[in-house]
Amino acid sequence: MLSLEIYNPIRLIIKNIDVCLIQRYEIEHCRRRLEILRVSVPQLFDRNDEYIETKCLFKIPKGIQPSFNYRSKRGRSGVNVNICYDIKLEVKVKGLFSDFELQVPITIGTDSVEYSNYANMATNSTTSIDLKAIDILELQVDDDDIPSTS
């Protein structure tokens, strides 16, 4: 469940808000960005309240890889594997040039307790989302446009 608290002091008309789960991965020099899940928040169509508090069902699919980062230098070649996730809020507001996006990095993991006796248990996974790190506002850029750091 995703909780949203919106403070709208100017009382702009919010046409809708979409929530997306984005997976970004880099393996060696191959970079990709995948949209895994997209949900429209049904309670936020054509609202202009000053304060809105709502919840939205946002279920992370089973079987996706946990967040992971591995770098190694061996001889002249190195190994680089990075899998990370973002939750992106796409906000559509009435008016010209008013729409905006907020992209928040999250960590997805598994609960090792569930896998302690793997042979005798059915595979279940849980996800951990940390939304406390709202510190990145990103412009939409194709991953192939991002210069490599190597």
Image: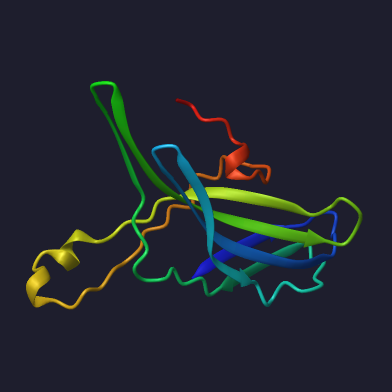
State the residue at coordinates (69%, 76%). Answer: 43
Residue 128, by quadrant, is bottom left
| Colour setup of the view | rainbow
Percent from the top left, x then y, of residue 20?
58, 62
Foreground of the two, 135 or 7: 135
Quarter that holds the C terminus: top left
State the residue at coordinates (51%, 30%). Answer: 148
State the residue at coordinates (34%, 55%). Answer: 66
- Can you say whether 41 is above or below 78 in the image? below
Q: Tell which residue pokes out farthest to the front in this image.
A: 76
Q: Tell which residue pokes out farthest to the top in this image.
A: 76
Foreground of the two, 138 or 141: 141
Percent from the top left, x then y, of residue 97?
87, 50
Residue 125, by quadrant, is bottom left
- Can you say whether 44 is above or below 24 in the image? below
Q: Is residue 112 left or right of residue 108?
A: left
- Can you say whether 43 is above or below 74 in the image? below
Q: Is residue 54 left or right of residue 49?
A: left
State the residue at coordinates (18%, 67%). Answer: 114
- Can you say whether 142 is above or below 71 in the image? below
Percent from the top left, x then y, of residue 63?
34, 68
